[in-house]
Amino acid sequence: MTVVLCLSVFWIIYGILGICGIQNIPEKYKGSDFEKEYKRYRGIGWLLLGIPMFVFWLVVHNVDISNKAPYVIVMIVIALPAVIFDFVVDRKYKKLLER
């Protein structure tokens, strides 16, 4: 469970940096009119992934895990909102980039 803690803390920090405008983005988005807004939305996406995973770790870090399957399923369900958000935002900005 240490991996979940480390990744969630990294994702939270990277999300906060993204909201502040400090984030590595693909070259095709650099220098565009919406670069700052794109970084902000990417930061929100990382926070949508990191915060629920951190809360999940807080809940289960002292639990003895014999069967890992239910925990993996819960982690997948927790990650779904971030994946959906990222998919929607990526489609939006690809359309803006094509214009």
Image (cartoon, rainbow, N blue to C red):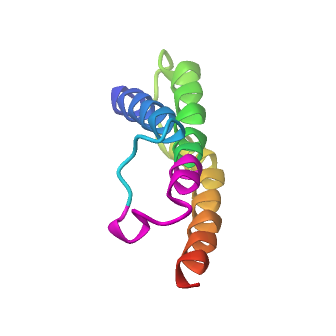
Residue at 50% over, 58% down: 35
Q: Nearer the viewer, residue 12 or 72?
A: 12
How many labels sit on residues?
0
Q: Which residue lies furthest to the top in this view?
A: 62
Which residue range is magenta in the image?
A: 26-42
Residue 10, position as x, y percentages in the image: 38, 33
Q: Nearer the viewer, residue 76 or 64?
A: 76
Q: In this view, does 63 lie above or below 43?
A: above
Q: In this view, does 20 lie above or below 75?
A: above
Residue 30 painted magenta:
yes
Tell me where residue 27 sits by quadrant: bottom left
Left or right of 49 on screen, residue 14: left
Residue 18, position as x, y percentages in the image: 48, 41
Residue at 48% over, 66% down: 32
Residue at 58% over, 70% down: 93
Q: Nearer the viewer, residue 42 or 3?
A: 42
Q: In the rendered image, which quarter contains the N terminus?
A: top left
Residue 46, position as x, y percentages in the image: 51, 44
Tell me where residue 6 sits by quadrant: top left
Majority SS type along the magenta span = helix
Tell me where residue 70 sits by quadrant: top right
Q: Which residue lies furthest to the bottom in this view?
A: 98
Q: In the rendered image, which quarter contains the C terminus?
A: bottom right
Q: Which of 17 and 31 is in front in this view?
A: 31
Residue 50, position as x, y percentages in the image: 52, 36
Residue 33 painted magenta:
yes
Residue at 56% over, 68% down: 90
Q: In this view, does 30 lie above or below 82?
A: below
